[in-house]
Amino acid sequence: MPAAPCPPSAPLSDQELRSLDAHWRAANYLAVGQIYLLANPLLSAPLTPGQIKPRLLGHWGTSPGLNLVYTHLNRVIRQRDLDAVCVWGPGHGGPAVLANSWLEGSYTDTYPSITRDADGMAALFRQFSFPGGVPSHVAPETPGSIHEGGELGYALSHAYGAALDNPGLLVACVIGDGEAETGPLAASWHGNKFLDPAHDGAALPVLHLNGYKIANPSLLARLPEAELDALLRGYGHEPLYVGGEDPLTVHQDLAAALDTALDRIAAAQRAAREDGVRDRPVWPMIVLRTPKGWTGPGEVDGVPVEGTWRAHQVPLDQVRDDPAHLAQLEAWLRSYRPEELFDRDGRPTEQVLACIPEGTRRLGANPHANGGLLLRDLPLPPLERYAVPVDKPGTTLHEPTRVLGDLLERLMADTAQRRDFRLVGPDETASNRLQAVYGATGKAWQAALLPTDEHLAHDGRVMEILSEHTCQGWLEGYLLTGRHGLFSCYEAFVHIVDSMVNQHVKWLRTTRRIPWRAPVASLNYLLTSHVWRQDHNGFSHQDPGFVDHVLNKSPEAVRVHFPPDTNTLLVVADQVLRSRDRVNVIVAGKQPGFDWLSLEEARAHCARGAGIWEWSGTDDGIREPDVVLACAGDVPTQEVVAAADLLRRHLPDLRVRVVNVVDLVRLMPAEEHPHGMPDREFDALFTRDRPVVFAYHGYPWLIHRLAYRRAVHPYLHVRGYKESGTTTTPFDMVVRNDLDRYRLVMDVIDHTPGLAARAAALRQQMADTRTRHHGWIRAHGTDLPEVTDWSRQT
């Protein structure tokens, strides 16, 4: 292997070596038992087909390596009194982590019915990948977990997120062969350039190369050793290599590597904290090479299994039907010598338990892995300090996110000592008008500094890297270990984390049903630089569909907000930063926009989620309106208010109701979302049978989907983005997508009974204005003066 600083070759005494090997064998035995056994957990009698699960599910191949890491982490945690958690990256490593948490007792602490004896072992085996039981991967149900094993790519970014602002915490992270090939994982190696040894904890990556994925060799395992070493050193790590097939030798080598890595981590932190050293450390990592399916069947039916891809899932898959397979399984289980590992009652022996830490030092009991236990409320400042005055709706303008930035600066300052709030984003904090935060903190940065750099700081709590995957991974790890944060992103490019938000919502939905999981701070997105003001960047930057994706997820865990102005953005931000166990999406503009509501009006409006803007319409509140103009989103709101002005001026007798929706899930029935509107409330707002012209920020069919069960749905006509984009003027974007005020007036005329004939001249005027608009922007490069100079007239 490539030259690396060599730790002592045999740091373990004979007694320690025997204890660690016994613990590892016990964990391997339990992992195999979970995959196969319904009964006879201690093999007190010969196995019979009826004692085998009817459906064999689970993954054996990665389990021996995970058991090895868990065993050795136990040793160093106990010896050094470490505060540590581990992120288990391999996708289906559930048997190993469940086995170890059962051995250490944290599983029984969490689930008292799964006792640490023969009956509990039988229950542990039966529940695994079984109806009514637990998943085959590390999941929210698993004590000590902060990482869902159902999708690969995010383990290391989760680990770095957990280490941020946790100076006493070690976050080990096992990265499997398959995960090591993903794009998100490749970017997450750069987390070491953002980790501050003075204020943060440490992440210790363990790259587990067992050679194979489901059906193919793994790339990093097949690289020439010098090339792999160059790659990892190029990422800024100092790799320590451990590998082999002889368990006793590997135990000694892994113990030595862990001791060396932890000594170097401690030295780097001591240099930063005590001596003021500001150079970026070269953090250690471990490369662990062990055979896939190690200690499992070497061959099955004459075909090699151990050390090949065939060990990935269930090496013996005909155990109930093939006596030879059944005999081979029993021999495999007995090879671990369970009679040495468990007493007659099925309790682990003292030798097996000798390496296990106590209390909350156990990996399955560490409160950082149940972060809601550590969570504190944010010291959010009073909104009155930042609210903008609104004497008359639609006559003054502010940049909503710039004002929010002022509030976030105060929040950063007020959390400077507690360090439990972070702002993350892909190089867009200033672009999104949030740069006021730099008055309180800088951007985290441990790499080289140049005289021209601005706002970079070793201890900064703004995290910017041009990888949305890494941003989200950091934030998820940060939130799940008991802190708060906000993810600011361009609307079109947040789609990059679609599958990550899938997993996080699933995590939250599951934890809501697990009594011992304490609520964590919500994952909050601020999406700006949105579709209607990406006129300069063009079609590639115009996509509002993230909201559609999120609203497909578990209703109780998601909320979507469209604050139409600055004060409503402040109120919504305050709400989401106080919330727990949700994914909140805020879509708000950064360009100057009209102020519609005072702070008190904004609070009332956001509490309702949707409401009538009496000052904008001509609805007298006594009789039903002739037509409802509805809107969700800042630009659609401006177009609806402008359309209502045109209707008031040209059709003063028409009763127009203007409804603004700020909390989109309010459109859903109460039976489908906990914040949805009951039918009576919805009907009172939108009517049951009057035409509704709805101007929506995103794809129009989403509104139809949310409201399809409502009585008014046959009369609902939605305008929104319909994939008509280019580089053009701001108003031309809404014209291209038929969302402009003139088109909305035409829609009112077209859909209001009895109006088409008497308003034909007005409709023609609106169509002519749209035609004139097209000629004007091509001649002048700007929008019509009556659009650019518009403000609401009372």
Image (cartoon, rainbow, N blue to C red):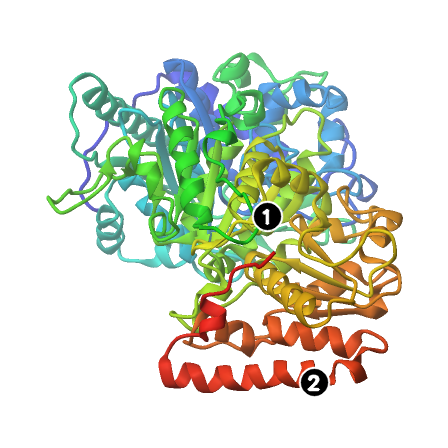
Q: Residue furthest left?
A: 451
Residue 352 - label: none
* Occupied quadrant, residue 224: bottom left
Q: In the rendered structure, which amino acid carries the disc numbered 1?
A: Gln
What percent of the width, then of the height, locates residue 511? 67, 34
What percent of the width, then of the height, locates residue 302? 58, 59
Q: Nearer the viewer, residue 630 or 504?
A: 630
- Above or below, 759 relative to 98: below
> In this image, 649 relative to 297: left or right?
right
| The C terminus, quarter of image | bottom right
> In this image, 62 relative to 448: left or right?
right
Q: In the rendered structure, which amino acid carries the disc numbered 2?
A: Ala
User: Dot 1 lies on which element?
Assistant: helix
What percent of the width, then of the height, locates residue 593? 48, 55
Q: Is disc 2 surrounded by few (<14), some (14 to 19) or many (20+) residues within 10 Å?
A: few
* Residue drawn 67% across the image and 22% down it: 110
Q: Which residue is mark 2?
A: 761
* Residue drawn 21% across the image and 36% down it: 282
Disc 2 from disc 1: Cα separation: 54 Å
User: Dot 2 lies on which element?
Assistant: helix
Q: Is disc 1 surrounded by few (<14), some (14 to 19) or many (20+) residues within 10 Å?
A: some
Q: Which residue is mark 1?
A: 503
Q: How many marks?
A: 2
Residue 782 shows in the view: yes
